[in-house]
Image (cartoon, rainbow, N blue to C red):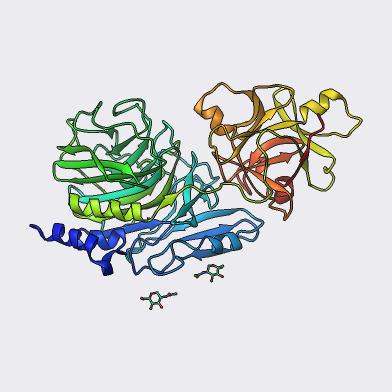
């Protein structure tokens, strides 16, 4: 392709009429067009004004599509907020903007089954990953363990040893070590069909297969039966641990070559973490790519991982470095930034509060603990000092995410409300990543139209709920008894007031 793509890429950066070119306009100019373009936050072509994603609300099961505010623009978050007011909302479809119809929908069961009763994976909450782009609010896709999207009938994707490129913009602070938070090319039958049958971006701190330098998390390539950081199947110390809040992760692969890059999606340029031959292990050269697209899961539907996806594309052909530099410049130009994760009535860090139920028949009950069990108990001014202490919570900055909150027990200092297998417990902060995440909650306006609802940070489809007087994090119509749709909005709506103790 000689110098043409490079010259075009330079032209994109300097010609004012092309400054607004989206990532897929840039890839197209390099002769490596997007065959899929997925984003809930913005259009990835400068002329795109179709739907970005579909949400489904819990109140009546209705769906609506969310489009950009303008051609090539940021998603209309107000449209989601309006449609989803006073109810739960799930992201049901992430539309493909390429025109090929390669949309991502709820991942079906595979080698691993999803947590839904039919074995499908969960859908992501539409509220889990608020973000701003150039000052405008949008929502990413917050993948909790058990969540996944897939398309097994993709048009135009790379198969066999054919070349492809891809990138994703992720939350570099949201990850775990389970398999596998992926975006990219995978098997078409949801099963592990062998080495070299996948080529997907992985992000997390798994050390089960390969790893990079430091403690992670790392960008790696999931090529099936292995997460690879370079040619050595075990380790490439050139693949650094990354800690950007907004992370650009980039992968491309062709006949006996592949490259992996990363960078800060909010500033600066990409760094190459690997560029060379296929891993020195059997089955990865030539590749046997199948061409499905996955998000949030492994090729066999392994669904234990977590992460947040804002945007990503898959290309046909091996994009040039110059084109990828232009794409990174475009991503930086989108101005990803954090935004408040709290809506509705505020909370003051350091204050002591009570949390009162609003369900008719339980309105004299407050969220309290008996030992390590969380429950709701009737509390009033004549109550014992002990009970007043058990129902008093000190608001702390979220242990797992500073945009949200944690609730420390007044009478058991150092212990916090956390969820464990979706039951609420009072637990001593052991400093672990999982404890901090499970003890972090985000506030939003109460789903029954008053007060507050208290969303789990790590499972944003789930809210603090009382059910048969015990405390849970419950999803609306999920698979557990305590997920019952009956009285859901009331049971997850609380009045936060001054404390008894
Ligand atoms: C979307 O773009 C097409 C093609 O440019 C244009 O005809 C159409 O009016 C646009 N739609 C909206 C809602 O802006
Ligand atoms: C965004 O959505 C709101 C609510 O549905 C709607 O009123 C508004 O017109 C939309 N804005 C644009 C620019 O389409």
338 and 484: which is toward the camera = 338
Q: Where is residue 210 in the image (x, y as percent from the top left)?
A: 29, 29
Q: Residue furthest right?
A: 382
Instruction: Using the image, determine if residue 299 lies above or below residue 138.
Output: above
Q: At 19% from the left edge and 59% from the top edge, which residue is drawn?
A: 9
For image coordinates 73% across by 39% down, the residue present is: 466
Give 66 or 271, whichever is nearer the viewer: 271
On-image quarter of the C terminus:
top right
Question: For residue 105, which quarter of the picture?
Answer: bottom left
Point out residue 296 in the picture as x, y percentages from the top left corner. Answer: 41, 44
Quadrant that contains the N terminus: bottom left
Q: Is residue 158 visible?
A: no
Q: Which image quadrant for residue 182?
A: top left
Q: Is residue 430 left or right of residue 314?
A: right
Q: Which residue lies furthest to the left in this view?
A: 2
* Position of residue 165 measured from the top left corner of the image (x, y, whole percent): 24, 50
Task: Decide which of 31, 388 is in the foreground and name it.
Answer: 388
Seen in the picture, residue 39 relative to 114 is either above or below; the reply is: below
Q: Is residue 96 left or right of residue 420?
A: left
Q: Which residue is drawn at 72% across and 47% down?
A: 493
Q: How many marks?
A: 0
User: Residue 393: percent from the left, percent from the top?
Assistant: 72, 31
Q: Is residue 64 visible?
A: yes
Task: Using the image, determine if residue 368 lies above or below residue 170.
Answer: above
């Amino acid at each position: 392709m000689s110098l043409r793509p490079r010259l075009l890429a330079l032209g994109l950066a300097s010609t004012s009429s092309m400054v607004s070119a989206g990532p897929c306009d840039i890839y197209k100019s390099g002769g490596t067009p997007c065959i899929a373009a997925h984003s809930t936050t913005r259009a990835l072509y400068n002329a795109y004004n179709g739907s970005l994603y579909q949400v489904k609300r819990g109140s009546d099961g209705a769906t609506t599509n969310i489009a950009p505010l303008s051609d090539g623009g940021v998603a209309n978050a107000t449209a989601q907020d309006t449609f989803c007011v006073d109810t739960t909302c799930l992201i049901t479809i992430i539309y493909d903007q390429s025109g090929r119809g390669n949309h991502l929908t709820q991942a079906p069961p595979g080698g691993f089954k999803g947590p839904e009763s039919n074995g499908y994976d969960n859908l992501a909450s539409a509220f889990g990953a608020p973000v701003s782009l150039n000052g405008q609010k949008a929502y990413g896709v917050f993948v909790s363990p058990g969540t996944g999207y897939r398309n097994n009938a993709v048009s135009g994707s790379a198969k066999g040893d054919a070349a492809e490129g891809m990138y994703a913009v992720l939350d570099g602070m949201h990850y775990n070590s389970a398999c596998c938070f992926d975006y990219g090319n995978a098997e078409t039958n949801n099963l592990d069909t062998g080495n070299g049958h996948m080529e997907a971006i992985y992000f997390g701190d798994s050390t089960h297969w390969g790893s990079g330098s430091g403690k992670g998390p790392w960008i790696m390539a999931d090529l099936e039966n292995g997460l690879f950081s370079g040619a050595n199947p075990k380790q490439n110390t050139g693949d650094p641990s990354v800690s950007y809040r907004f992370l650009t992760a980039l992968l491309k692969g062709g006949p006996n070559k592949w490259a992996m890059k990363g960078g800060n999606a909010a500033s600066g340029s990409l760094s190459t973490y690997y560029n060379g031959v296929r891993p020195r292990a059997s089955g990865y050269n030539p590749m046997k790519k199948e061409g499905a697209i996955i998000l949030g899961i492994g090729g066999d539907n392994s669904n234990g991982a977590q992460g947040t996806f804002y945007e990503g594309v898959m290309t046909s052909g091996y994009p040039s470095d110059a084109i990828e530099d232009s794409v990174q410049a475009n991503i930086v130009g989108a101005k990803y930034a954090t935004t408040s994760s709290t809506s509705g009535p505020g909370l003051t860090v350091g204050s002591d509060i009570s949390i009162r139920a609003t369900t008719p028949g339980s309105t004299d009950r407050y969220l309290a603990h008996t030992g390590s069990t969380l429950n709701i108990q009737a509390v009033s001014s004549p109550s014992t000092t002990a009970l007043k202490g058990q129902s008093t919570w000190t608001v702390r900055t979220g242990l797992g995410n500073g945009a949200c909150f944690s609730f420390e027990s007044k009478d058991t200092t150092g212990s916090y409300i956390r969820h464990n297998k979706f039951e609420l417990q009072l637990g001593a902060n052991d400093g672990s990543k999982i404890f901090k995440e499970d003890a972090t909650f985000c506030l939003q306006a109460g789903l029954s139209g008053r007060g507050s609802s208290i969303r789990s940070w790590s499972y944003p489809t789930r809210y603090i709920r009382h059910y048969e007087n015990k405390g849970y994090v419950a999803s609306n119509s999920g698979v557990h008894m305590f997920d019952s749709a009956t009285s859901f909005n009331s049971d997850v709506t609380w009045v936060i007031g001054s404390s008894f103790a």
